[in-house]
Image: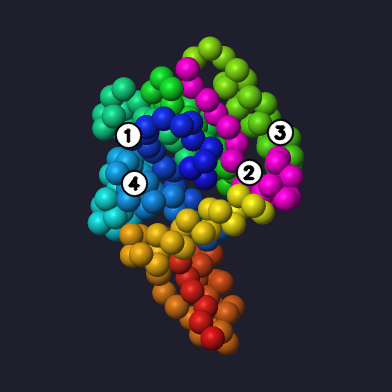
Amino acid sequence: MADALPQRPCKTRANHPGTGRERRRRSDPGAIAVHGGIRVIGTASPRHHEALRALGVESVDYSAPDLSSRIRELSSRGVGAVFDHLGPESAKNSFGLLDRGGTLICYGIAADLDKTTALVPVFLGLLARLALWTALPNGRSAPFYDFWEGMLIGPTAARRRRRADLAEVLELLSSGAIKPIVATTFPLFEAQAALEHAEARGVFGKVVIVP
């Protein structure tokens, strides 16, 4: 996902929280950013703040009505990058947090997944908004990361990029530079219980099924 950023130093970035479903779909880029010496501000439920601080992430309550102001207090000039998968409304606020030259990386519409709203118009509307923001002469950009493999760049290119991303993450894991956060484990014959636990709100880390 870092390949969506411009080729310039990024000193501070903000990371929005995932729903339980979305957290299971991705490897948290925050740990990789901290390893790279980047200051990370993460929005999360207060019950997760202590665990995030232990990872080197500065935490802000994602439900705070003045969320943008709280982040501005930590980084008055704005941030170099924001990673946001929540959707159009959140993306608008996230774009406003960027410093000049900053980049908003959108990679989902998680806030709309549990609604009855048709998702295709929401997704297309978000793409149009991101294209407009990037075209404006404001010194900021807002690409959409091709999280849904092949939708924007084609399946071959998507698989190539996914393999490169995974290889980088596995190398960092094998060297001990980053460590996976495992919430709990379940035996294979309790797979249903594992899925129910993973769907519950409040899970921090991965739910792992072992043979």
Residue pointed to by mark 2: 146
Amino acid type indicated by mark 1:
Lys
Q: Which of marks 3 and 4 is in front?
A: 4
Residue at disc 3, secondary structure: helix
Query: Residue 79: where, in percent of width, then height?
Result: 36, 30
Amino acid type indicated by mark 2:
Asp
> Mark 1 or mark 3: which comes first in sequence?
1
**Callout 3: few (<14), some (14-19), or many (20+) C-alpha neighbours within 10 Å?**
few
Residue 124 versus residue 35: which sits nearer the camera?
A: 35
Residue pointed to by mark 3: 124
**Callout 1: few (<14), some (14-19), or many (20+) C-alpha neighbours within 10 Å?**
some
> Mark 4 or mark 1: which comes first in sequence?
1
Query: How far separated are the C-alphas under marks 3 and 2?
Result: 14 Å
For the stretch drawn in magenta, what is the main secondary structure? Answer: loop
Query: How far separated are the C-alphas under marks 4 and 1?
Result: 10 Å
Residue at disc 1, secondary structure: loop
Query: How far separated are the C-alphas under marks 1 and 2?
Result: 24 Å
Q: Which segment is the magenta one?
A: 139-158
Please say whether residue 152 is one of the residues in the magenta stretch: yes
> Mark 3 or mark 4: which comes first in sequence?
4
Asked whether the residues under the numbered discs 4 and 1 touch, taking CB atoms below 8 Å apart as contact, a structural biologist would say no
Amino acid type indicated by mark 4:
Gly
Amino acid type indicated by mark 3:
Leu
**Callout 2: few (<14), some (14-19), or many (20+) C-alpha neighbours within 10 Å?**
some
Residue pointed to by mark 4: 36
